[in-house]
Image: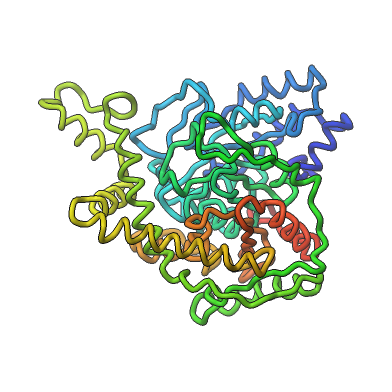
């Protein structure tokens, strides 16, 4: 068995027992990248020399007691990494090298992780397929003609193709959970405020969260316990204690009340064969002693328009900082006659079609005469969506839903139809609007492509969703591998 076939927890145990070294694990990941990434294209930037040096230092010290000591991990390329290029998959930041680490990178470093590289994404995390990267699209390891989902498609594909043991992603409307489902891996979107966003390039500040993709719930839980917690550099983080999720997990669902919202299962949402994968997972919950309770989240139908108004408005404000003056792509001096030329030329050349589309939509929604009509109205409906979840959690411990209306689709199928692309996140967006946590676990195959069950918990309910996810994963035992692995 290849070292890359180990789960993160298995690799951690072998390091502690001195059966393998961090250098061996790290080299095995880079060997896998050299073997497969020319086809998958999961990585924008590799960190091989520094990673091997760090792995050697960990081995020399024999210091395997920290939570992630010696474990190779990747990070989505909009998370700042000191002295390592961070592009957000955008031409406007193609050569940007941060002078500091994001808090989540600092916490990985303190836990002993080995950062092997930066993964591809939709530009500034704007997309659902990783086709909007300014550099190249990423392929799904299960079928190279299909998308891996997005915007954390590079992270999901890297984990699925065994190029790393876990990867950081970000989730604004489903950007961890949807690619996790399409690539057959596990992904967690934490509650809003559970993980620091300091040093993470903002898309929509009231929606963004950093999370984790890994092979199974307990691998994901271990990394989550490292990166979570209050950060004085991010005033939105919550001062709540962080459990050691993987050590405190319980896989007994006896007596647990699991909500099944009718709005997510109404006719026409999913193909019958895709829905069957989810129904099998629901039957598994009942088999394990969980009680399925029908619930309603009546304002779910408004989530998509509310999200695209609020998200685009925040995008318009956040991306205004990329002005061609302080950093990033700048026009040559002979092109500049006045200050406006810098803004116009740098942003026209630097931003792709999707960021431009969202900037224009958000600027319109915030403009005089329209802010009350659109933006403020959307905020009010967001409150109603949040209230739906709060009332539901008075009756149930967790909620389960599909993750994506379809399995991975063909490249190019939706790229020229923004509305069709936006609909692919219809099941994941409400959790971001409500600020709650969500875990996706792979539960089966439909036409040889994976599908994932979404488990939603209340705010700071990560332990609950890990418990449910672990119980389902143990029972279903999803062991299938992507076709590219042979």
- Which quadrant holds residue 55? top right
Near-viewer residue (137 or 151): 151
Q: Residue furthest left?
A: 337
Colouring used for the render: rainbow
> Is the N terminus in the top left, top right, bottom left or bottom right quadrant?
top right
Taking 452 as reference, is 82 left or right? left
Residue at 15% across, 32% down: 340
Residue at 52% across, 75% down: 263
Near-viewer residue (41 or 415): 415
Taking 473 as reference, is 310 left or right? left
**Percent from the top left, x then y, of residue 84?**
51, 25
**Percent from the top left, x then y, of residue 434?**
51, 57
Residue at 67% across, 42% down: 224
> Is the C terminus in the top left, top right, bottom left or bottom right quadrant?
bottom right
Taking 323 as reference, is 278 left or right? right
Near-viewer residue (156 or 308): 308
**Percent from the top left, x then y, of residue 97?**
44, 24
Residue 450 visible in the picture: no
- Which quadrant holds residue 476? bottom right
**Percent from the top left, x then y, of residue 172?**
48, 50
């Amino acid at each position: 068995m290849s070292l890359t076939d180990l789960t993160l927890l298995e690799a951690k145990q072998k390091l502690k027992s001195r059966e393998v070294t961090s250098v061996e694990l790290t080299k095995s990941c880079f060997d896998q990248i050299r073997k497969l990434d020319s086809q998958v294209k999961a990585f924008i930037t590799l960190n091989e020399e520094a990673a091997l040096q760090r792995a050697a230092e960990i081995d020399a010290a024999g210091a395997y007691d920290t939570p992630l000591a010696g474990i190779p991990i990747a990070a989505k390329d909009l998370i700042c990494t000191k002295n390592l290029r961070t592009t957000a998959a955008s031409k406007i930041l193609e050569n940007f090298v941060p002078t500091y680490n994001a808090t989540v990178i600092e916490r990985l470093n303190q836990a002993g992780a080995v950062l092997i590289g930066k993964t591809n994404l939709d530009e500034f995390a704007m997309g659902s397929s990783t086709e909007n990267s300014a550099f190249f699209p990423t392929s799904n390891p299960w079928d190279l003609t299909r998308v891996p989902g997005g915007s954390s498609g590079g992270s999901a594909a890297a984990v699925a193709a065994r190029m790393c043991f876990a990867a950081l992603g970000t989730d604004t409307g489903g950007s961890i959970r949807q690619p996790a489902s399409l690539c057959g891996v596990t992904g967690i979107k934490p509650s809003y405020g559970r993980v620091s966003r300091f040093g993470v390039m903002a898309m929509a500040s009231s929606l963004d969260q950093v999370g984790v993709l890994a092979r199974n719930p307990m691998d994901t839980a271990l990394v989550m316990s490292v990166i979570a917690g209050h950060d004085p550099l991010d005033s939105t983080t919550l001062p709540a204690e962080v459990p050691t999720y993987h050590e405190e997990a319980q896989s007994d669902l006896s007596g647990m009340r699991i909500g099944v919202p009718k709005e997510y299962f109404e006719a026409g949402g999913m193909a019958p064969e895709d829905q069957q994968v989810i129904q099998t997972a629901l039957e598994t919950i009942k088999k394990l002693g969980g009680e399925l309770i029908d619930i309603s989240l009546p304002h779910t139908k408004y989530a998509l328009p509310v999200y695209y108004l609020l998200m685009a408005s925040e995008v318009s404000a956040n991306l205004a900082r990329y002005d061609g003056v302080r950093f990033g792509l700048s026009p040559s001096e002979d092109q500049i006659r006045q200050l406006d030329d810098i803004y116009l030329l740098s942003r026209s050349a630097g931003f792709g079609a999707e960021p431009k589309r969202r900037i224009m939509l958000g600027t319109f929604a915030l403009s005089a005469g329209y802010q009350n009509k659109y933006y403020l109205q959307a905020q009010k409906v967001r409150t109603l969506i949040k209230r739906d979840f709060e009332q539901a959690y008075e009756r149930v411990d967790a909620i389960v839903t599909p993750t994506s209306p379809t399995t991975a689709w063909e490249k190019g199928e939706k790229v020229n139809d923004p509305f069709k692309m936006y609909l692919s996140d219809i099941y994941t967006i409400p959790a971001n609007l409500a600020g709650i946590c969500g875990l996706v676990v792979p539960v089966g195959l439909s036409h040889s492509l994976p599908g994932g069950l979404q488990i939603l918990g209340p705010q700071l309910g990560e332990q609950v969703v890990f418990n449910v996810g672990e119980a389902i994963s143990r029972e279903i035992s999803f062991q299938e591998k992507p076709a590219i692995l042979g």
